Image (cartoon, helix red, strand yellow):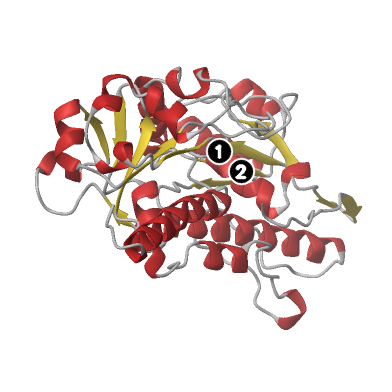
Amino acid sequence: MRPRRTIAGLGWAWCAAVIAGFVLWGIGCGREERTSQATKTGNEESRELRIVAHSPALAVILRDLGYEPQIVGRHAYDLVLDPKVPSCGELGTIDYETLIRVRPTHVFIQWGARELPERLTELAAANDWVVMNLNPLGLDEIEACAREMDEAVFAWTVGEEKKEEGMPGPGRPRHQGEGASRGPEHAKPPMPFEEEMRRAWRDRGVGMQRAGRILLLASAKPLGAMGPGSFHHQMLERLGGVPALGAGGDDKFKAAWVTLDLEDLQKLAPDGIVIFSPRPPRTAEPEKAATAEELIALMGRAAELNVPAIKHKRVAVIDDPLGLTPSTAMIGVADELAGIVLRWGQEQENAEGRGGKK
């Protein structure tokens, strides 16, 4: 049985802070390690690739791109990198002393719509850093951020290799939008998870719809729901599922993040409930999954309501440590979510085949 504190203890306020943090900042894949050599040719020095990932979400994407060995600085609340990697700041702050000390070639930061700090841009200009402000807040943006970081590093690496060979290079990109050399001798390989991403986020068929209306929660007590505008809602729609929030009715149910009361839950009457309750980072998956009955018991008074999801025990949890992190981790999360909903869809089909509709 999964530890109950994982779900009950993960308050909506904490979840909302995590999710809101990603908004304010902009907040299994096969990997191949990518390397960059450090050599000197003549009077020019070819530098090694050194990346600062000033965002937990961007760090996950960089890891899955294969660049983890080149990351020399991280966000204070990073979820996947070695804790020994120096922290270069947290939400809305930058530790400039550490940033200068780790000598980056690239700084990937999630800063939202705000202008980058003047000191950061000045340091970047003085030290020849590539700085990119990237905000993966939806599935398309996750893919775009991955591609832009990969292309920036590739273009930079091509420039360094040409310097090493004594050839005129295309120059390193200084900002988002400058691409790599497109010559055949420097063709950029595809991202390691490119096909897997397309496969994971595809429509999974009629079984998703047969499961009925699905409510996505980031907290069971209080009931914190994820609606239109959240990447979880977008994921459910891409998979072919039917979200309980957003389809007509009360405007309250059309927001990205909604705190529900018992009356709201009764009104929504979801056919299934999926709770996203990330277990702590770097912890193994529990040997035994929590049962629907155990999850319902953790919902307090909501467990007493006569709504289809509770009546038919269609309540499940996704406890992936990165389940609330908008990144390439959503590839695995999408598969898990689809598996849950498709199982409920099959149960519904079986029930109807026996002559009764649940």
- Mark 2 to mark 1: distance in Å? 9 Å
Regarding mark 2 in the picture, which secondary structure is present there? helix
Asked if 22 appears above or below 34 in the picture, the reply is: above
> Residue 15 location in percent, x, y?
40, 27
The structure residue drawn at horizontal position 63% and vertical position 58%, both measured from the top left corner, is 150
Total marks in image: 2
Q: Quadrant of the N terminus?
A: top right
- Say if residue 176 shows up in the picture: no
Q: Are marks 2 and 1 in contact (CB under 8 Å)?
A: yes
Task: Please name the amino acid that badge 2 sits on.
Answer: Val
Asked if 345 appears above or below 70 in the picture, the reply is: below
Mark 2 or 1, which is nearer the eye? 1
Left or right: 249 with respect to 272?
left
> Residue 252 location in percent, x, y?
14, 38
- Say if residue 156 shows up in the picture: yes
The structure residue drawn at horizontal position 40% and vertical position 21%, both measured from the top left corner, is 14
Task: Please name the amino acid that badge 1 sits on.
Answer: Leu
Q: Name, please, the residue furthest toward the bottom.
A: 184
| Residue carrying label 1 | 322
| Residue carrying label 2 | 60
> Residue 253 location in percent, x, y?
18, 42
Q: Earlier in the sequence, mark 2 or mark 1?
A: 2
Question: Dividing the picture into quarters, in which one does residue 148 lie?
Answer: bottom right
Left or right: 223 with respect to 119?
left
Who is closer to the viewer here, 279 or 186?
279
Report crowding for label 2: few under 14, some 14 to 19, many 20 or more residues within 10 A (C-alpha): many
The structure residue drawn at horizontal position 61% and vertical position 41%, both measured from the top left corner, is 59
> Residue 181 location in percent, x, y?
66, 72
Regarding mark 1 in the picture, which secondary structure is present there? loop
Asked if 12 appears above or below 350 in the picture, the reply is: above
Who is closer to the viewer here, 263 or 222?
263
